Image (spheres, grey):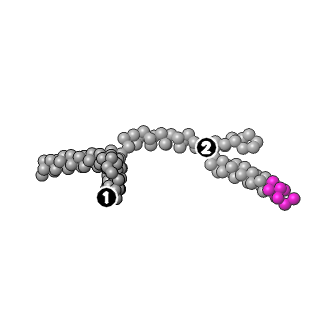
């Protein structure tokens, strides 16, 4: 059965290629003919069939790429995972300095320092806004 399918597939591919070549050559032949309604209709039909064939090729390429991705995946998955984890640790805040210059590594104290900073910042922004627009 596999051999018959292979023979059929090759014959079909040859036929499809032959039809595409004929379709690509047909518009130049038709443009050299005397213009009539029948010729214009055939030019339109050929152009439509060419567009459909181009759409089929594009769809086939997209499907092949998706199949390859699903089949092979990203071969560097472990590498990219290691890089992402390293970046996550590099971007983590492990210690923070308060206004008086004292440093802390405790999570609760870091949260207090950050909260205090943003409270002061927003109070300042509100004061500036009120003094600007309410005067």
Q: Position of residue 114 (x, y in %)?
A: 68, 49
Secondary element at tag 1: helix
Magenta span: 128-135
Q: Residue at x 58, y 43 (%)?
A: 92
The foreground one among 68 and 124 is: 68
Kindly give the residue lying farthest to the right in the view shown. 135
Kindly give the residue lying farthest to the bottom in the view shown. 134
Secondary element at tag 2: loop
Residue assigned mark 1? 38
Q: Main secondary structure of the magenta part?
A: helix
Q: Is residue 57 above or below residue 130?
A: above
Q: Residue at x 66, y 42 (%)?
A: 96
Mark 2: give few (<14), some (14-19) or many (20+) Cα within 10 Å. few
Q: Give the left or right position of residue 2, taking residue 89 as reference.
A: left
Q: Residue at x 77, y 53 (%)?
A: 125
The reply to whether residue 56 is visible in this rendering is no
Q: Position of residue 78 (x, y in %)?
A: 40, 41
- Check contact, mark 1 vs mark 2: CB within 8 A: no
Mark 1 or mark 2, which is nearer to you? 1
Q: Residue at x 64, y 42 (%)?
A: 95
CA gap, disc 1 and disc 2: 75 Å
Q: Position of residue 89 (x, y in %)?
A: 54, 42
């Amino acid at each position: 059965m596999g051999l018959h399918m292979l023979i059929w597939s090759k014959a079909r591919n040859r036929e499809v290629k032959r039809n595409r070549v004929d379709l690509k050559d047909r518009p130049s032949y038709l443009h050299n003919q005397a213009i009539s309604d029948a010729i214009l209709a055939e030019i339109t039909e050929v152009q439509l069939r060419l567009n459909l064939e181009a759409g089929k090729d594009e769809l086939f390429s997209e499907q092949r790429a998706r199949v390859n991705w699903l089949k092979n995946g990203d071969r560097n998955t472990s590498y990219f995972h290691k890089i992402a984890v390293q970046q996550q640790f590099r971007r983590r805040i492990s210690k923070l300095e308060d206004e008086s210059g004292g440093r802390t590594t405790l999570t609760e104290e870091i949260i207090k320092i950050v909260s205090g900073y943003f409270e002061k910042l927003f109070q300042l922004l509100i004061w500036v806004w009120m003094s600007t627009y309410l005067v």
